[in-house]
Amino acid sequence: MSKRKGLSTNEIAKIAVLSAIAFVLMYLDFPLPFLPSFYSLDFSEVAVLIGGFALGPGAALIIEAIKIVLNILFEGSKTAYVGEIANFIIGVSLCVPAAAIYRKQKNKKNALRGMIIGSLCMIAVGAIMNYAVLLPAYSYFYHLPMDTLIEMGSVLIPLIKDKLTFVLLATVPFNLIKAVATGILTMLLYKRVSVLLHRGQ
């Protein structure tokens, strides 16, 4: 993004398109067979990260926010917006640091460094949010005792015994897989897509 204040019409249009793509990708989610079924993997952050790399960390923040707002408008919320807010925070924790680091010097090495740091941020934030907010929210809004959620995890991963081990052995691996997959897809797609995103700037 340029150093001037505000967004150009061209940038707003690109953010809108990337937000729509992120929203659609959010629907194309699927569970991982070795993790509890309510952890569904989607690649919506690929669009957010591409937007952040091309247009800056502010754009990544906006795209992530619009994606969540669209999801609420079309799907509503089953967790009184707790899950959506947590999803937003976790997504931002990956994409905004990665985009901010890449913006300093736009090369492959910095892109990789940004994605590694962003991934570590997402894993840490995701662990905290799941332990403190998401698992209790799922328990409350879906009328499932915490022991039931833990049992769902222990069926797949016998070492899960409580909420902490659930987060360490299910949540952390899930976010690690998501971060790595998002990073790989972004690296594969960015150069092809960035030609279009930088057009008109």
Image: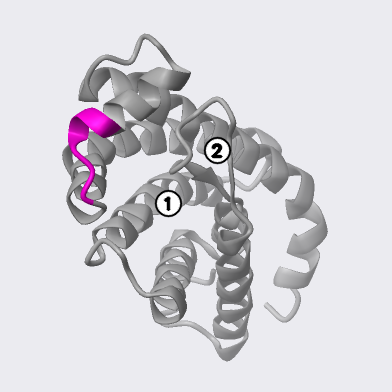
* Residue beneath disc 2: 178
Q: Which mark is residue 114?
A: none
Residue drawn at (65%, 33%), measured in percent from left and top?
109
Residue furthest top in the image: 159
Does the image show residue 167?
no
Q: What residue is rendered at 17% in x and 50% in y?
A: 140
Can residue 176 be seen in this snapshot? yes
Residue type marked 1: Gly
> Residue 45: image x %, image y %?
55, 53
Question: What is the C-alpha distance between the residues marked 2 and 1?
Answer: 10 Å
Residue 93 belongs to the span the image colors magenta = no
- The quadrant holding residue 79 is bottom left
Apparent side of residue 36 relative to residue 85 in the rendered image (left or right)? right
Which callout, 2 or 1, points to the residue nearer the camera? Answer: 2
Which of pointers 2 and 1 lies earlier in the amino acid sequence?
A: 1
Give residue 121's position: percent from left, percent from top: 37, 36
Q: Quadrant of the N terminus?
A: bottom right
Along the viewing direction, whichever of 77 and 12 lies nearer the viewer: 77
* Residue appearing at x 41%, y 26% in the figure: 170
Q: Residue 183 sits in which quadrant?
A: top right
Residue appearing at x 26%, y 32% in the figure: 148
Q: Quadrant of the C terminus?
A: bottom right
* Mark 1 nearby-residue class (10 Å; few <14, some 14–19, many ≥20): many
Type of the residue with mark 2: Lys
Whether residue 92 is situated above or below residue 146 in the rendered picture: below
Query: Relative to residue 158, is residue 188 drawn left or right?
Result: right
Helix, strand or loop under label 2? helix
Residue placed furthest toward the bottom? 9
In this rendering, the answer to whether 14 lies above or below 108 is below
Q: Which residue is mark 1?
A: 91
- Magenta region: which residues? 143-148
